[in-house]
Image (cartoon, rainbow, N blue to C red):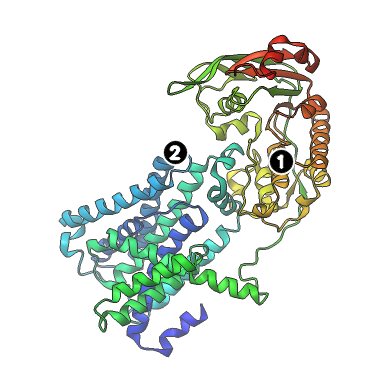
Amino acid sequence: MAALLAFPFLTTSYSAYQLGLYLLYGIVGQGIALCWGNGGFLPLGQALFFGIGAYISGKILQGNIGWGVVILALILSVIIPALIAGFIGALVFDRQIGSGPYFSLITLALSLLGYQLANSQVLLTGGFNGLTGINGLPGIDSYGNLYFFIVGALAVSTLFLSHLVSTPFGQLLAAVRENEERLQFLGVKTSRVKAAAFAMSGALAGMAGAFFAPHQGIVTPQVVGFILSAELVIWTAVGGRFGPVGPVVGAVIIGFLASGLRDSFAYWEVVVALVFIIVVLRLPGGVGGLGISIAKRFGINVWSQKKFSRTETVPGADQKESPTLEFDNVSVQIGPVAILSGLSFSIKQTGIHCLIGPNGAGKTSALNALTGKLPYSSGKISWRGNTLKGIRPFRTSGLGIGRKLQVPSIFPGLTIRQNIDIAIWVNRLKFTHLFSLKPYQWNISLLDELQDSFPFLKDNEELAGTLSVGQRQMLDFTMAVLAEPNLILLDEPCAGLSKSETENMISVISNLARSSKATFIIVEHDMQVVELLSDHVFVMHQGKLLAEGSLNQIRDNKEVQRIYAGGSK
């Protein structure tokens, strides 16, 4: 930042003027990086919000102005794009998990629409010629002091984003990028997280637009169009999308490169395109990512995050002994294929209930129907008096249901500590905690017990993606139970574990079942595991309940013997 402040004194006023423009583009790129690098969804129409901010600011600054008017222009230029972006995000992201491609295309279409509107609405935007006669800030020279205001705006945006990514909100946004479905099952409405991030990116773009109007003195439809939107994405990719500095670096590098080549080389755009292609292919983290990698080789941690000790024990969840779960003639059909065919069973006692059956019997599908991942077409599923028809996965956690999926489902790009943090926050994190660092100090007594059983969980800084399959199973199990749910669904918790790891997992589950008031439903193929764990067994076949009872009763059942002896599935 000191170098930016010194720049006007070391070069010409025109160079500082150019740099100011590129810094404004860099601020817009910071918003793109927040969504793309941190959240995993790419906005392709970010110039729309930049242009809205510029038009609002330009329209207000056309009149006689004082500093009160300037502040009003800045506030409106930030708030209105933020509200529009948040509304668009809420509409798009609420439809389905992983709606990234649709979101990108919709933002692209909106940018094209914005360009057409800016061209046609002469009274509001000046039409094709744009808004002209825009006054500068009172007493501020566009080729002089305005540059320092832009640097100040960049400092504000950089500090804001640096803090944001270190908060629980930033960690949840990163978790969306890594595994949105898992985060949903941990009780987070991910559409709100993404919409909020997009609103923040809209606010940053609007703020940059507010300074663009007095900086340039004119606002034309090109500022909301697709070409600028595409350039903003390119600059962000070149500089690096995983931090607030990279997009600024990219905008400055490409900006001065293009400026230097434009008058001397007819095909300068080809050079810019080649730079973009090389960076995408060889430097996925951008120039900023390369710089961070080089720094790490020399033992320099560029983005060191403060480490917190778990010093505050938060109250455990209220686990009530009311384990009434009922499947009443539940059917699931996808096209012509019947997944569940009138499945009916009920659980009215705590303990460990094992769900077994041949492959394709519908065991996992039953859990999917229970947790909202798979909508059922007829019948009724109720849990503790709540009918679960049409329930969304993120709501199941609030009803006291925790789930470990069939394939270990973790956040591979986050550390073990961060995975555990998110699980601890389930049903405990309030809105006021989202932007505070206090939740990083939270602890629950159950975590201490699980870390004793699975010692690798104490390796806080290790990335979860580097764990073995067995360790991933254990981490996934840990995340499912840390919320202390009343109903714990475990889909093949011992799959991929060694003999000693299996014995350890069985011991942990048994101890947890005895010490808590939770009801366990375990899908399992290993009959030795079923024998050691089960209080009650349900056998499924062809989407229906075939038999239930103790394991000995199941073994003596003729129909079960026929199915497991190789009869038709």
- The answer to whether one can see residue 142 in this image is no
Q: Is residue 392 left or right of residue 344?
A: left
Residue at 28 percent across and 62 percent down: it is 227
In three-dimensional space, the C-alpha distance between marks 1 and 2, rounded to whole angstroms, equals 35 Å
Mark 1 lies on residue: 496
169 to 488, vertically: above or below: below
Q: Secondary structure at mark 2?
A: loop
How many numbered circles does the render carry?
A: 2
Quarter occupied by residue 122? bottom left
Residue position for label 2: 94
Q: Residue at x 62, y 17 (%)?
A: 541
Residue 502 coordinates in the image, percent (x, y): 79, 38
- In the image, 278: left or right of 554? left
Mark 1, other Cα within 10 Å: few <14 / some 14–19 / many ≥20: some
Residue at the (41%, 75%) spot, across then down: 252
Q: Which amino acid does the dot numbered 1 rest on?
A: Gly
